[in-house]
């Protein structure tokens, strides 16, 4: 999936344009690079591979996002660095995760009553994955 990636912090804009400034690290628009393969998606959402089961976010109600049907490792060598949240493809929040002390999951209490929710997780080895 295409996105505009901040070269400073790794934030990915998925609304079709690079922002004037990064909403996470405030880097200028010039710090963004458009990438056709910025985010990975499962090849077949009904038949996930083991790697896809470890990386694709799982969204449940009330809003709780865990990374993977199979829990992703959280060790210094291989972990989920953060989870970004979007409503209608507009960034709303980032949860930063540290290895060894946390599980790869986050919860938010949203004021929004409607809109398309997206979660993007970033694996330090296997890249960014999205669930909408």
Image: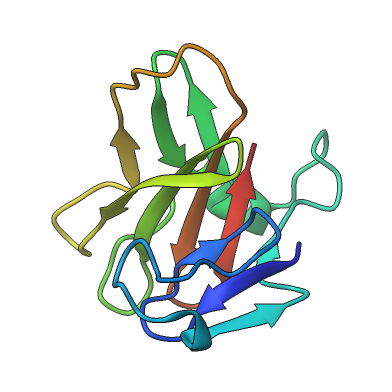
Q: Is residue 35 left or right of residue 62?
A: right
Q: Is residue 12 left or right of residue 39?
A: left
Question: What residue is drawn where x is 67% and y is 67%?
Answer: 3
In depth, the one of 60 and 91 nearer the eye is: 91
Question: What residue is drawn where x is 74% and y is 73%?
Answer: 37
The quarter of the image holding the C terminus is top right
Question: What residue is drawn where x is 36% and y is 66%?
Answer: 79
Residue 26 placement (x, y as % from top left): 31, 72
Asked whether residue 71 is in view, the answer is: no
In depth, the one of 52 and 23 nearer the eye is: 23
* Location of residue 19 with respect to 77 vertically, above or below: above
Residue 130 placement (x, y as % from top left): 61, 50
Question: What residue is drawn where x is 35% and y is 59%?
Answer: 82
Q: Residue furthest right?
A: 44
Asked whether residue 28 is in view, the answer is: yes
Residue 116 placement (x, y as % from top left): 62, 28
Q: Is residue 113 left or right of residue 23?
A: right
* Location of residue 42 with respect to 4 vertically, above or below: above
Residue 7 placement (x, y as % from top left): 46, 86
* Location of residue 31 with respect to 24 vertically, above or below: below
The quarter of the image holding the N terminus is bottom right
């Amino acid at each position: 999936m295409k996105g505009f990636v901040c070269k400073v912090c790794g934030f990915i804009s998925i609304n079709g344009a690079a922002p004037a400034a990064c909403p996470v690290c405030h880097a200028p628009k010039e710090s963004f690079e458009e990438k056709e393969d910025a985010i990975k998606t499962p090849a077949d959402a009904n038949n996930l591979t083991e790697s896809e089961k470890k990386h694709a976010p799982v969204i449940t109600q009330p809003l709780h996002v865990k990374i993977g049907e199979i829990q992703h490792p959280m060790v210094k060598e291989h972990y989920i660095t953060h989870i970004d949240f979007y409503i209608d493809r507009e960034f709303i929040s980032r949860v930063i995760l540290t290895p060894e002390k946390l599980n790869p999951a986050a919860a938010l209490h949203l004021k929004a009553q409607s809109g398309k929710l997206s979660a993007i997780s970033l694996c330090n080895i296997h890249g960014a994955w999205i669930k909408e």
